[in-house]
Amino acid sequence: MPIDILMPALSPTMEEGTLSKWLKKEGDKVASGDVLAEIETDKATMEVEAIDEGVLGKIVVPAGTENVKVNAVIAVILEEGESASDIGSSKPAAEAAQKPEAEAPKEKKSDAAAPVPAAPKAPVANEAASDPSIPEGTEMVPTTVREALRDAMAEEMRADDKVFVMGEEVAEYQGAYKITQGLLAEFGARRVVDTPITEHGFAGLGVGAAMAGLRPIVEFMTFNFAMQAIDQIINSAAKTLYMSGGQMGAPIVFRGPNGAAARVGAQHSQCYASWYSAIPGLKVVMPYSAADAKGLLKAAIRDPNPVIFLENEILYGQTFDVPKMDDFVLPIGKARIHKTGKDATIVSFGIGMTYAIKAIEELSKMGIDVELIDLRTIRPMDLPTVIESVKKTGRLVTVEEGYPQNSVGTEIATRVMQQAFDYLDAPIITIAGKDVPMPYAANLEKLALPNVGEVIDAVKAVTYTA
Amino acid sequence: MAPRKSSGAAARKPAAAKKSGLAGGITDFDKADEIKAYGEMLMIRRFEEKAGQLYGMGFIGGFCHLYIGQEAVVVGMQMALKDGDQVITGYRDHGHMLACGMEARGVMAELTGRRSGYSHGKGGSMHMFSKEKNFYGGHGIVGGQVSLGTGLAFANKYRGNDNVSLAYFGDGAANQGQVYESFNMAALWKLPVVYIIENNRYAMGTSTARSSAQSNFSLRGNSFGIPGHQVDGMDVRAVHAAAVEAVAHCRSGKGPIILEMLTYRYRGHSMSDPAKYRSKDEVQKMRSEHDPIEQVKARILELKHASEDDLKAIDKKVRDVVADAADFAQADKEPDASELYTDILL
Ligand SMILES: Cc1ncc(C[n+]2csc(CCOP(=O)(O)OP(=O)(O)O)c2C)c(N)n1
Ligand SMILES: [Mg+2]
């Protein structure tokens, strides 16, 4: 039976790609392991290898086709003794079997690997209103979070020779998630340093270099691996200023993707926002939009303190407007009012914002006018902005992906209860990930994460809406 | 990137068995051994090819690290073990599980995240275990399994049995600090653990030359007095010979030992690795000149242990098992929603 070659998924988050080139033509013999075609995603060009033996009977998707969906038939291989006329009798292999129910995480994972133009432009209302530093009429450039982070590092490295970036695969490989793309070419191996897989070692080395006056940016391939290094981050980076009586500290940025990606399982899917925010001596930043990622990373690099900068793999490919300015820096420790409203307040940050934004759209259709605050910095926390909002709305819901016990939300709830108790008209609801390690199965992973429905229900509950 | 000096892309013959306390050498496989090794390596190869295919179709998600090219390592090691010996490794673990005798169906169903998988769909490609087969995972944090494997050996010594634990890790993992903390304790307390460094020359996109001040990993135990040996990890007989000696060394109470397996992965690091850090020639050369399965096949035919047709029959049987596992893993149900909250605490 002729064998369909399907457009492969080449990464945990890929949905479509460009079929850039065929390396075999119709009629060519193929053996298992032969490279058939090249496919481009925004992260990489990948090869499609043949698994079966036979003859390339028909190319269904010609070279140069963009936005080819994963699992579309791209070619047909004929086995010994078959001819092109047999094509058509074959059945798409995927059809027969039960598809995983949760093809749906795709909706949320709008994806690092999708081609850039396909990435949705998330709405960011009122941003300029909260950050008056952007002059009227400034040009806005659609930029992915990935590019914004890279631009921030490049600008700071151009401005200050003391700034360097270090981590696994940051140089020659251009970054495991392509955040450091192009930096090696511009700044050379002295300032863009590939390390061995030794997180505890290079985190400590970075802190030492910072104590000696350099400005390291230490990339963790993901923050899950920073657990190997957490002693140096907390015991050395966070405490040296205090222990030395102010003589020396560690001006260092620890950055990388944090939280769940897509189906990468228990050891690779954890949010560290509340962990690091418990530590005096650290600043903790967790941006949602590309503009915030850029302005806050620049601020973090200039900050004389250790800053934990928590990114998100799913947000990397999303596009937002970034102001075109020579030096766009945002203040650490200031929240951004994403949308003003009067009926209830939602406080979120990082990828949590994606649930909140969808929820407030739905809620506004029901006539509930929500004020949405993007915390941006977890420590120091901009509580005054939250309190101000709660005084107006009297109702509060927090949204994050991390574990529910000792979450950022429970911290906010405690402080709001202490400082604005008389203004509250309903108990605060904290939406978080479920109290379980992240499961691998698609359906369970979906259940383990927060969802838009939970946020909507929470707002309805605090506003006593049926 | 400048073309790397073909760094002996040709056969990396193991450095002479210096300072190793091991004779090195090759086990003289009889007919049964050759056929067994052939079938088991082929099973891993075909299983991995199918897993790659299912990943491409979206049935497997997340990270999926294939073992293609390295099959001789686990198969040769496993042939030297006895009941009760334990195995632990990292995330490139499908081959280890199959070699330990875990069922293809259960492994594949875990890859698709279904309820009949070894972890009921909750672990995934990187996290599978089988108490019954003494397979202790399946670990995603590079280097973490090395201390755990040392602990398995500690338990054997504590109980006074003569079982041995095999702790597998990569050339990249060999640079993690806890590896050396483990080496020290294992040597100090003479723990029966075989440290198997699967040196496939790359840790993701970083070659050993770019990551390691000492890239002869068999010497990494020197300062602790742990003997080490480089082994041609593409030749299942060489792996077996080293395994037999290493396991005997541990069983006789002499403490830990290191085996550096010189091997190679044909595919990218994981499914999303464009593998631009090495040349296609380098990969092609390894495949065509050192393939572990082709080597056995050639010997079998040359020595007339079996005919082409006999081998085709083995291949067919293997393909059938893999196809059955794949069908099963696609048709099986996802775990029940209630599983979300089970197995967190006892
Ligand atoms: C502590 C930690 N750091 C980084 C990673 C990301 N990572 C996964 S595999 C890998 C490369 C490991 O290479 P090696 O040890 O040589 O094993 P191989 O993949 O070649 O089998 C890296 C960097 C991780 N999983 N854990
Ligand atoms: Mg390796």
Image: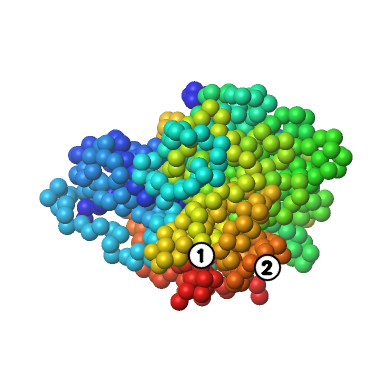
Q: Is residue A409 above or below residue B257?
A: below
Of the image marks 1 and 2, the number of the one nearer the N terminus: 1
Q: Is residue A57 above or below residue B189?
A: above
Query: In the image, residue A160 lies at what x, y percent?
Result: 65, 25
Q: Amino acid at mark 1?
A: Asp
A75, A127: nearer the viewer: A127
Q: CA distance from mark 1 to mark 2?
A: 17 Å
Cβ of disc 1 within 8 Å of ligand 1? no
Give the residue pinned by disc 2.
A421
Question: Where is residue A405, by image quadrant?
Answer: bottom right
* Image quarter hosting the C terminus of chain B: bottom right
Query: In the image, residue A17 lies at what x, y percent?
Result: 34, 44
Q: Amino acid at mark 2?
A: Phe
- Badge 1 element: loop
Question: Pointer 2: residues within 10 angstroms few (<14), some, or many (20+)?
Answer: some
Q: Which mark is residue A343?
A: 1
Q: Is residue B304 left or right of residue B80?
A: left
Residue A83 makes an appearance in the image: yes
Question: Where is residue B251, by image quadrant?
Answer: bottom right
Q: Chain of mark 2?
A: A
Q: Is residue B51 above or below residue A35?
A: below
* Residue at figure coordinates x 39%, y 61% from the top left: A104
B319, A164: nearer the viewer: A164
* Residue at figure coordinates x 59%, y 66% from the top left: A394
